[in-house]
Amino acid sequence: MTLRRLLTSSAAGLAALTVLAEALSAPSAAAAGAVEARALGGRPPAEAGPEPTDPPAARSAPDRPAIRSVRVLPREPVARPRRGVRLVVEVVARGAAGPRGVTLRVEPGRRGRGRAAPPPLRHARGGGWEVWRFTPPVRLSRWYPAGRWRAVATVRDARGRRTTAATSFLFRKASTLTGVQAVRARRRPRALRVSGTLMRVDPTGRFDYWSFPRQRVSIQFRKHGGRRWKIEARARTDREGAFHRRVPRRHGVWRVVYPGTRRYAGVIRVIRHT
């Protein structure tokens, strides 16, 4: 064997040994990495690959517009003969876009077409909620139908998505008790005669008030310094709205109570008898 061939074969063997040593040392390095990761409480290193990305469902989507509450003040409006009721409607919403992001309409009945309210006053609250306060310019007067009404609020965001919420309230017209008195009954010294007239806002519009026939009232008594009222008698108005009833004579406070109806508000008139 010549010297050149011997050197060539020795270099090849040395290269082969080097490759074999690297192949044997690679699993040991991976195992060492796994042991190190396990000691640190982590995971072993994985094979190299593309960088992971969040799935589309995990990305936070913008919240839809929402309405938390719709409140009407006063809660039970009552119209007088010459004075209507000014409503204030407060809407708590979030996600509204622009100064007209929340709109409101007030309408009679459970369904129907009502009047749209003008732009409201806007106040910020925590958590992204805002208070929108509407003051409709038209008062609810005797000329509007009594009964159940609705306030319907709609919030719209910058993408055009909408959310609607509504609340109902009872609008009624006033009633009154006139000429209520408690006097000693004739020929019955131990009895009192309680009388008066029940009237309501004139439904025809010709007068302020008119007689309210065929309605029930209660006559109640409370002792001086007491807190509890006791019903002593009940009466029914005639076609002129008048009523009267005899009750036992007592020293204390008397009152006549009309509870009202769906369209007419109740009223209380107090009489003091000593």
Image (cartoon, rainbow, N blue to C red):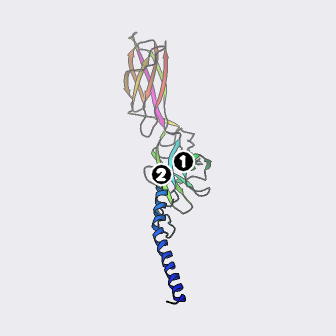
Position of 212 with respect to 98 (left or right) is left
For disc 2, the marked residue is: 165
Observer-nearest residue: 218 or 195?
218
The disc, 2 or 1, on the residue closer to the chain's N-terminal end is 1
| Label 1, residues with CA under 10 Å away: few <14, some 14-19, many ≥20 | many
> Which region of the structure is painted magenta?
192-205
The amino acid at mark 2 is Ala
Q: Write the residue at 38% across / 18% down.
A: 246
The amino acid at mark 1 is Val
- Residue 127 is at least partly visible in this image: yes
Where residue 82 sits, quadrant-wise, is top right
Spatial separation of the CA atoms under disc 2 and disc 1: 11 Å
Q: Position of residue 241 (x, y in %)?
A: 43, 31
When the figure is inspected, residue 94 is found, relative to residue 33, above or below; the finding is above
Position of 200 with respect to 129 (left or right) is left
For disc 1, the marked residue is: 92
